Image (cartoon, coloured by chain):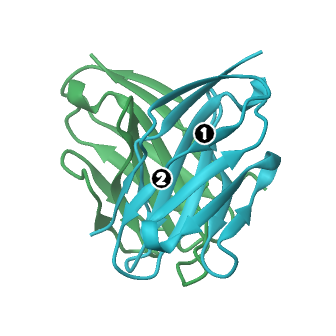
Chain colours: A green, B cyan
Amino acid sequence: NAGVTQTPKFRVLKTGQSMTLLCAQDMNHEYMYWYRQDPGMGLRLIHYSVGEGTTAKGEVPDGYNVSRLKKQNFLLGLESAAPSQTSVYFCASTRRIDRAGQPQHFGDGTRLSIL
Amino acid sequence: AQSVSQHNHHVILSEAASLELGCNYSYGGTVNLFWYVQYPGQHLQLLLKYFSGDPLVKGIKGFEAEFIKSKFSFNLRKPSVQWSDTAEYFCAVSGGSYIPTFGRGTSLIVHP
């Protein structure tokens, strides 16, 4: 199994450009998440999804949109990129959320630079 | 709302030294607690987790963590670190919403 796959791995954009980051998981997980990782800030949740067709805002949703049209895919969009969105983006998925505390499975990350 | 605080932002140790990384959380109810490790250039991987039972949890690579409910703490320990433990370590907590909140991370450098 590939687990969680993110594409692309690296991207450089100019301010104002748009792009979509793709996250795909082959584990039939219900929950999917998008985080950004910045030095000294840890991981901050951008958006998440609890199932196909559903999305919800996380801690830092402004400037991003997401879609979960298929259970295995979770797309993160930047409509008009800004330098403040320069970051490393991680996608994660979880089998289900219950009292047993399912751990998250992470992708390898997308390093995005906005000039 | 839940929150996580990792007290040590940067830790530098020599090989064979003992390690303890602090993690405190705030949440009034039942929690699930996690430690993840991120090796240079890689994604986060689960080290260990606690959700119930024995408060002393053993994970991979010789790591363990102790859940102390009265102190809202979940500190990570390893008796003897190796150069290969150089990485960033993240504590995470999930409470009622079951959506995890991560701490800011602790960067560990182990000198050979």
Badge number at residue B19: none
Give whichever of A18, B58 is nearer the camera.
B58
Determine whether the residue tagged by mark 2 lies in a helix, strand or loop.
Answer: loop
Q: Which residue is mark 2?
A: B23
Residue at 75 percent across and 57 percent down: it is B59
Drawn side of residue B15 relative to residue B73, left or right:
right
Q: Quadrant of the C terminus of chain B?
A: top right
Residue A33's spot in the image, x, y percent? 45, 59
Task: List x then y, in percent, for residue B44.
Answer: 60, 45
Q: Nearer the viewer, residue A2 or A18?
A: A2
Name the image quarter holding residue B86: top right
Quadrant of image for the N terminus of chain B: bottom left
What chain does mark 2 sit on?
B
The residue positioned 80% from the left and 28% from the top of the image is B16
Query: Is the residue A72 above or below the residue A4 in the image?
Result: below
Cβ atoms under marks 2 and 1 closer than 8 Å: no
Is residue A69 in view? no
On screen, A4 above or below A42? Answer: below
Q: Residue at x 40, y 28 (%)?
A: A112
In space, the residues marked 2 and 1 are separated at their CA atoms by 25 Å
Tell me what residue is drawn at x 63 percent, y 26 percent.
Answer: B40
Residue closest to the eye, A50 or B60? B60
Which mark is nearer the camera, 2 or 1? 2
Q: Residues within 10 Å of mark 1 (few under 14, many from 20)?
A: some
Name the kind of residue labelled 2 in the image. Answer: Cys
Q: Nearer the viewer, residue B68 or A48?
A: B68
Please indicate, yes or no, whether residue B14 appears anywhere in the rendered image.
yes
- On whether disc 2 and disc 1 are found on a single subunit, the reply is no
Residue on which the image places disc 1: A108
Estimate the x, y position of residue A93 in percent, counting from the top left. 56, 62
Measured from the top left, where is residue B14 in percent x and y? Answer: 71, 20
Vertical order, B26 against A100 (above or below):
above
